[in-house]
Amino acid sequence: MAVRGRRRNNKKNDSSPNPERFIHKAIANTPVSEAPQKRRFADLDIDQGLKDRILKKGYEFLTEIQDQTIEYLSTGNDVMGIANTGSGKTAAFLIPVIQQLLTSNKSFKTLVLVPTRELALQVEEECRSLSQGTGIFCTSLIGGTSVSRDLGRLKKTNHIVVGTPGRVTDLIQRGALKPSEFSTFILDEFDRMLDMGFVNDVMRIADQMTDRKQTILFSATINAGQGMLIKRLLKSPKEVKVSSGTHSAAHIEQEVLKIQEGEDKFRILLNMIRQKEFSKVLVFAETKRGVSKLSVKLSKSGIRADEIHGNKTQAYRERALNKFKTGKLQVLVATDVAARGIDVNDITHVINYQAPRTMDSYIHRIGRTGRAGKTGKAITLIDQE
């Protein structure tokens, strides 16, 4: 029986969150037609070709994080932006960068660091679609792919380079990537990147960017313990907090399902996802082995399921994610890290087969549903003990 209730207004970002914080009744977003103060992309004073490409992608109104940061970013301010997953942060920083590249008399380069391969590919794809036909070139540098390919790419013109810290550091050490050539530095999902052991890589890269004029940090959560690092990276930043950075999105229905002693947890999961409304489901487990085991069991039970985690090759992860996006899979099972960068607007449910260890992880997990202003649903299975 699902336990429903109102979420407590806990201010502390707990390291071991109380399951009661996983319970919340969704509050539907106000339809844009009922929000006349929202700005339209069509009304922005930006390059007409860029505007046309934005509108072609189906973007009509600026999201809150886009609306509140676009002027700051366009005028070269350092910015720290906090907004829920799926709120349009990628376009929020790419649109001003591309606009400046199109209109500025002086050429410049931008380096975007992200914590995972999937997110890097997502940012690169968005960048390419927004800059198509302009002579602005974007590329991604990620682990699990050919270093030789990356070396070849870096011999060509690249205005926007997106990469994971490990691969970027490797290419800097090889002399193929020169941080001093980049004047804009963007860290997307910066909280997780700093938590994942990339602190030294990030700070080393930043220190080598001797011509750095603008630094931008975006994330869905904020960790108070990273305050000193943030101060080292940013100079007189404009801070925009569309969400608290410590609470989950209000438009996502959140429930807890307590597994009683003697109940078969897997059978409960299977019965859930066999229901018609569970048409595109993202399931989280804590470990790579747990993800693989769960994916195999679902497949043997007749569910179209696959998995992504750090032990899978990049090619495998990309194929699995593409099958999930196109509806060839009903269920994708993932670890926290591998799920960063899953940008699929029609995920109907997120299921935490194992509860996350931190509230930050919970916020990022459930943010995979209810994207682009839609209402989503998240269910967390809690073992009785």
Image (cartoon, rainbow, N blue to C red):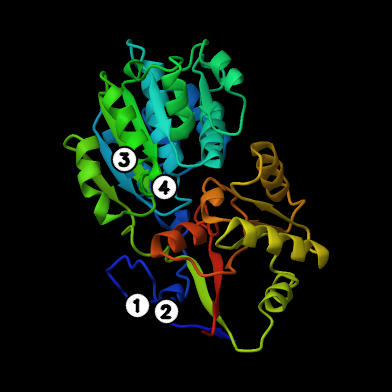
**Residue behind mark 4:** 196
Separation of marks 4 and 2 at Cα, in angstroms: 27 Å
Separation of marks 4 and 1 at Cα, in angstroms: 28 Å
- Residue at 23 percent across and 32 percent down: it is 77
> Which quadrant, please, contains the N terminus?
bottom right
Badge 3 crowding class, 10 Å Cα cut-off, few under 14, some 14 to 19, many 20 or more, is many
- Residue at 57 percent across and 59 percent down: it is 287
- Residue at 43 percent across and 58 percent down: it is 34
First along the sequence among labels 3 and 2: 2
First along the sequence among labels 3 and 4: 3
**Residue behind mark 2:** 20
Residue 311 horizontal/vertical position (percent): 63, 46
Residue 180 horizontal/vertical position (percent): 32, 17
Q: Look at the numbered discs 2 and 1 and tell me whether their residues touch, using CB distance below 8 Å.
A: yes
In this rendering, the answer to whether 15 lies above or below 193 is: below
Of helix, strand and loop, which one carries label 4?
Answer: helix
Front-most of residues 259 and 219: 259
First along the sequence among labels 1 and 3: 1
Q: Look at the numbered discs 1 and 3 and tell me whether their residues touch, using CB distance below 8 Å.
A: no
Badge 1 crowding class, 10 Å Cα cut-off, few under 14, some 14 to 19, many 20 or more, is few
Instruction: Give the number of the mark in front: 3 or 4.
Output: 4
Residue 312 horizontal/vertical position (percent): 66, 45
Q: Which mark is residue 8?
A: 1
**Residue behind mark 3:** 69
Residue 310 horizontal/vertical position (percent): 59, 47
- Residue at 51 percent across and 14 percent down: it is 135
First along the sequence among labels 2 and 1: 1
Identify which amino acid the numbered label 2 is placed on: Glu
